Amino acid sequence: MAHLVGKRITLVMTALALGLAAAGSAANAEDLDGRLTGVLHAAGFSGQVEARLPARLGRPVNRQLADLGRLLWFDTSGGLHSDNTCGGCHSPANGFGDSQSIAIGVQNNNRVGPNRAGPRNQRRTPTAVNTAFYPKLMWNGRFAALSGDPFDNSAGYSFPQPEGTSRFPPYDPIVTHLLIAQAHIPPTELVEVAGFTGTKGTIGPEFDQFDDGLGSVVPLPDASGFRNEPIRQAVLERLNSTPAYRRKFGALFPAVAAGGAIDFIMFGRAIAEFEFTLVFANAPIDRYARGEKSALSESQKRGALIFFGKGKCVQCHAVAGQSNEMFSDFQMHVIGVPQLAPAFGVGKGNVIFDGPGRNEDFGLEQITGNPADRYKFRSSPLRNVALQPAFFHNGAFTRLEDAIRHHLDVFLSVRDYDPITAGVDNDLTLPIGPMAPVLARLDPLLATPIGLGPEEFRNLLAFVREGLLDERARKEHLCRLVPRAVPSGFPVLQFEGCPRRGGESE
Ligand code: HEC
Ligand code: HEC
């Protein structure tokens, strides 16, 4: 008897447990959505940032101006030796970011992709997508809107010398966005676009030399004063002597139609306008925040809770206020990224790196001169990060999971780091630069390892990889922006990641 009663009780309890489990999973899902919605709200995330672009600009995007910017983006006529242009490094096959771990600029093989070859610069090219919303640009934040808002020039835009704070002063009626100012810079960069000959070096005595591509390091002529302006004038001469550009600028700028010269502000406005069309900030996380509960999978939701919670990610990859929901606080931190450097010399690198071994990157210190800022880099905005072939300022990792795992235990990651297993290109597999001084400055937020179980890690990865990806940033959509021909008539770079060049005609 007692035996039978016992059995019955077991049966009842099993049935009860099963019922509870079913009800529990529904309640769990609700609870998951309830928790995540609350967390996003508390973090200041609305999923509305893209929709606000025209309001922030105070006008709609001008498609004709943007299209001119697109042609300039892909036209090597902006380089004094016609061998590079924005698109050579900011590739449509990679969300308008690098196809390499460290950018290759001038003297390249006219290819963009894994087989691009030529002297390396110092850092990986970040994506240009969504830069319209960045209050600070570059790995060390050196181009900044002093108002904290790229759409607001009331405090002016700040650049390192020679532009400084006076070149783009407060309340300029035309330079009304940080990207208009930014576009003044790349064409003047010797290693990126301009090339070496016929220019003057001012960055510092150690930069007054270059690899001439023939095996010798040659001092630049006349290392004095301002070199950027003469380069811009030379670029403008090239544009002004191209009839197709005169027509296209003339259709947009009455001064050019009336016979006046194309100036650099016009160039900057066209480029910036193109960048405004590269806003792709409608990812699953945005749709979810706007109420579409099925936009994220359960795993991505759990990953999001880790991102905004015990993973501490949001403490640097912030979404509130001036971060414009870009997953960056736009502050500089030391996170202990292994220090890669190419050898300097023919076909290797054309930038002399920092430190006694010339194999370091001092990051923010390069700009402030303050040793306390050594090895600090900007928290990377994380939208569309899945489209990158490499991660961090030097592409030290080529798998997203490795880049995330690095944060979880920086000391272990550095101890075990091997450039070959990390998957970087052969020319970057030299022994890495010193790490003890980097780790000594590690951001306190990452000083203690963050413990995540394997499933938690998979969820976090799923959130970062898919939850932050706007499908429109994929190459399937962006490759069609590559023009078949450009106004200068120069050959268009060959994009290995794009199935076929063009689609849209000039
Ligand atoms: C040689 C490769 C190269 C070329 C060519 C190039 N860039 Fe870049 N770009 C970079 C690298 C590398 C960085 C980051 C540099 C750093 O932080 O020190 C960058 C940064 C940027 C940024 C800031 C992105 C961010 O996340 O803050 C913008 C915007 C940009 N470039 C636009 C352009 C435009 C416009 C052109 C053409 C006029 C251009 N670039 C040409 C390599 C290149
Ligand atoms: C202390 C601030 C800080 C915290 C906390 C932090 N990050 Fe980062 N993260 C950075 C910085 C700074 C960089 C860029 C470092 C560099 O390139 O030198 C970065 C880069 C990245 C990158 C590479 C992006 C790219 O463009 O290459 C990923 C992915 C990333 N973080 C994900 C995460 C995740 C996920 C978490 C939470 C587990 C996290 N981060 C926590 C500061 C932080």
Image (cartoon, rainbow, N blue to C red):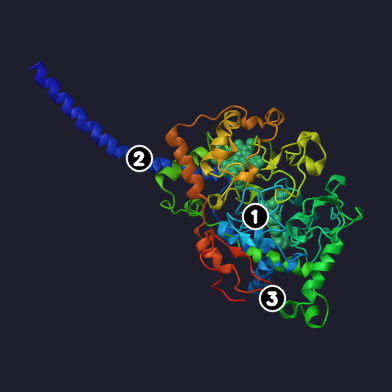
Q: Residue furthest front?
A: 215
Q: Is residue 318 visible?
A: no
Query: Would you name the residue on which mark 1 appears?
Result: 117
Picture disc at residue 487? 3
Of the residues under marks 1 and 2, which one precedes in the sequence? Answer: 2
Q: Is residue 229 visible?
A: yes
Q: How far from the left and from the top, in percent, is residue 269?
A: 73, 67
Residue 458 position by quadrant: top left
Crowd tier of the residue under label 3, counting other residues whose Cα lies within 10 Å: few below 14, some 14–19, many 20 or above: many
Q: Are marks 1 and 2 in contact (CB under 8 Å)?
A: no
Amino acid at dot 3 = Pro
Closest to the observer, 155 or 317:
317
Q: Residue at x 56, y 74 (%)?
A: 504
Alpha-carbon distance for marks 1 and 3?
Answer: 26 Å
**Assess mark 1: CB under 8 A from ligand 1?**
no
Number of marks drawn: 3
Look at 76% across and 65% down and name the residue there.
81
Residue 27's tag is 2
Please identify the quadrant where the C terminus is shown.
bottom right
Secondary structure category for the residue under label 1 = loop
